[in-house]
Image (spheres, rainbow, N blue to C red):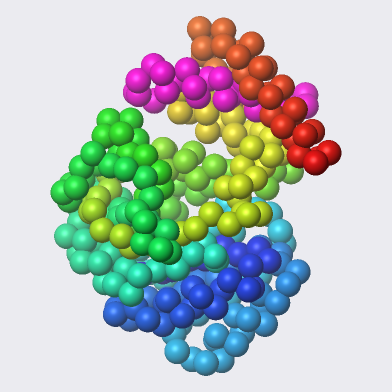
Amino acid sequence: MITVLTPSYNRAAYLEKLYISLLSQDFNDFEWVVVDDGSTDATGVTVDRFVCEGKMKITYVKQNNGGKHRALNRGVKEANGSLVLIVDSDDSLPEDALSTINKYYLKIKDNPAVGGVCGVMAHHDGTVIGRRRIAESMDLSSIDMRYRYGFEGDVCEVFKTEVLREYPFPEVNNERFCPEALVWNRIARKYQLRFFDKVIYFRDYLAGGLTSRIVRIRMDSPVASMICYAELNELDIPARYKMKAAINYWRFRLCSHGRKKYPRLRGRWNLVAPLGWLAHLTDLLRIACVSHA
């Protein structure tokens, strides 16, 4: 079984499109787990209607608003499938997505070094997101994808459930965001993914979504952001990416407001603190301009 996991917050109006795309799948050995992260709209009523139709196995869980990462942690605990495919509430799947995922999973399911499979994302109009230097199926880590093979844009990682349980998202007190890259990079230190060059996910970037507000969100969750960039800086990746990570670390460390517990950078990378301060100042100016627009 594949678990399709959807964290949702006030996205009732978009769930119907995802639901229809799941009903259209040419593979039926899956469940849909919807974790409602404290929605105040009709999310519960909408999902209850889907459940009453009885056309697929659906688990609905509602929790207090704590951020997407906490919803994902809860959903992984609820999952019954061997794989977890995370699908945001405003996205959808091509009709052969799950059968394609299953086909490649069967080739690696007994390989302990491979933690899942990975396909390609596209916009709903069919335009493929990002660029990749490889087209053939091969095993590589998420770190290799970004920093060795030059992947650009989002891809669709589908992890073995046991792997996601091994690497849950850190839950920092008083923060409601944790970068997914933090966990994907941790997984990549131990596991590879079977990559295949086929679209298995449709995504558009909506106004008001996480992507459109990412800087403000990271500023409001500085510790998780610092953990992500500090760990990225420690990876075996080209120096220019380490430099960028160090700058972003300081960029968001300046939002920590005197918190005593946060990760530290090592040695020379602290010399980029002035560049991080400039990036932080630019963020503040942009936010101020938007507020007064």
Name the side, left or right, on which 58 lies relative to 141: right
Q: Nearer the viewer, residue 127 or 277?
A: 127
Image height check: is 63 above or below 206?
below
Q: Which range is magenta?
A: 234-261
- Give me the residue at 29% from left, 80% from top: 26
Image height check: is 138 above or below 232?
below
Residue 179, quarter of the rendered image: top right
Image coords of residue 142 (percent x, y) = 34, 41
Q: Is residue 142 magenta?
A: no
- Give me the residue at 53% from left, 33% from top: 228
Residue 73 shows up from this direction: no
Image height check: is 241 above or below 81?
above
Judged from this view, the residue extending furthest toward the bottom is 53
- Give me the residue at 53% from left, 54% from top: 205
Image coords of residue 41 (percent x, y) = 73, 72
- Where's the C terminus, which quadrant? top right
Q: Is residue 239 magenta?
A: yes
- Give me the residue at 64% from left, 73% from top: 12
Name the side, left or right, on which 109 lies relative to 73: left
